[in-house]
Amino acid sequence: MGKAIPEVMCNPADKELVLVSVPALADAFFRGLDTFLIHAFSDKSRAPIVEARVNNLVLNLPVPEDIANI
Amino acid sequence: MSLIKPLSDLRNTNEISKLALEIEVFGKLAVAQAQRADGDRGRTVSEAMKRLRKRIRSDMRDEPVRLEEVEMTDLARDPIVNGIYNGIRRGVEVAVANECYGSAVVLIYSGIDSMAYLAMPVNRIDVRRKDFIDWAERYIRFPCKEQLTGADLYGARCAMLHTYSVYSKMSREGKCRIIRVYG
């Protein structure tokens, strides 16, 4: 991914606007995702809740052969 | 102790969970992707259960689990590998790599929503604005002085997902900044 430094830019004269590079936003999201999962599964009280919810996520699974061959 | 446990439960208990966290999901993903690239759909259930029982017995004897014994079977079906890494994350990676930045941003905001769902309090079913903002505030951090707030990201999320623009009700009301992105 390309690098934009600084990753987030803000014009002091226009406090309503902020610029961010997409690769930097993606990197930040990936880091956050990793950190969150480690936090979640390291916490014994939260882990079962997250585990249950993770099982609700949409998964990409191969179609079973007996169905695929219909 | 139950001898047979769902694969997903292994993350929560005993040394296997610690080991799995240490080698982390990246390691699993690499193996799963290699398996998939080789056309491997995973072991049969009987093979998987045989290895699983071996691991559980090993754990009950407090023997260290060797790395090569860590169950890699069907990792491509593991919800974290499949749903989060091969699903949410890979979609963003593919979009960025192909310079589809608008789509990448939509997927990132959607991904934050999904993480907020996983992180919301136990007694809740639906994700709320605060869940998104709290998750983003805590986990979306940039290696520079200027940061996006959770509110900035929530406003941008609403703008992109609802109108594919940068303007949201929150930004119009001055409750967040407008996020403009560039590749």
Image (cartoon, grey):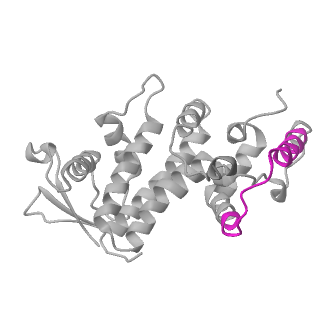
Which of A35/B34 is in front? B34
Secondary structure mostly taken by the magenta-highlighted segment of the chain: helix
Residue B22 in the image: x percent, y percent? 68, 54
Point 51% across, 42% down: residue: A57
Q: Is residue B16 visible?
A: yes
Q: Is residue A34 visible?
A: no
Tell me if residue B106 is in the magenta stretch: no
A2 lies left or right of B182: right
Residue B116 in the image: x percent, y percent? 41, 40
B128 lies left or right of B49: left
Which of A64/B6 is in front? A64
**Which quadrant of the view contains residue A4?**
bottom left
Residue B169 in the image: x percent, y percent? 13, 43
On-image quarter of the N terminus of chain B? top right
On-image quarter of the C terminus of chain B? bottom left
**Which quadrant of the view contains residue B132?**
top left
Residue that lies at the very extreme toward the bottom in this rendered image: A2
Point 71% across, 64% down: residue: B35
- First to last magenta residue range: B34-57
Residue A43 in the image: x percent, y percent? 59, 36
Point 15% across, 43% down: residue: B170
Vertical placement of residue B2 versus B103, above or below = above
